[in-house]
Amino acid sequence: MTVFEYGKTHYPQVQDPIFTDTLIKGDCWKIELIKGVYELSFIAARHGGGSITHIVTKEEFEAVKEGKLGGWDLVKKYESIAYEKNR
């Protein structure tokens, strides 16, 4: 059991992403190959929570797997596109 000191800030430990042939799982996001489609899912930061899913390309999946692109970079990209569509 971890003991926390009163008044001291504690930060959660960041986990390294998990990589397989069909899944990349990071903190609060994942990209998974499901029935031939790469799906980016992440926890929504909105009232009621839930998760949001976007379709990404195989090239983006491979770029994240190779470390050229981060999962949160894709979240920002697809969320900004969705925001502009609904404006």
Image: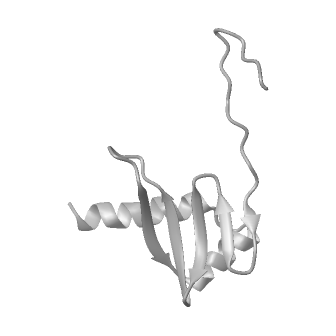
Residue farthest to the bottom? 36
Residue farthest to the left? 87
Q: How is the image coloured?
A: one colour
Quarter of the image holding residue 68?
A: bottom right
Judged left or right of residue 69, residue 55 is left
Between 20 and 64, the one nearer to me in the picture = 20
Q: Residue at x 50, y 59 (%)?
A: 42
Taking 83 as reference, is 6 above or below it? above
Judged left or right of residue 84, residue 31 is right
Residue 60: % across, % down: 59, 77
Residue 6: % across, % down: 66, 9
Q: Quadrant of the C terminus?
A: bottom left
Q: Residue at x 60, y 84 (%)?
A: 58
Judged left or right of residue 44, residue 7 is right
Q: Residue at x 51, y 65 (%)?
A: 41
Judged left or right of residue 46, residue 7 is right
Q: Residue at x 39, y 48 (%)?
A: 49
Quarter of the image holding residue 65?
A: bottom right
Q: How many marks?
A: 0
Residue farthest to the top? 6
Taking 20 as reference, is 79 above or below it? above
Residue farthest to the right? 1
Residue 13: % across, % down: 73, 38
Q: Quadrant of the N terminus?
A: top right
Residue 43: % across, % down: 48, 54
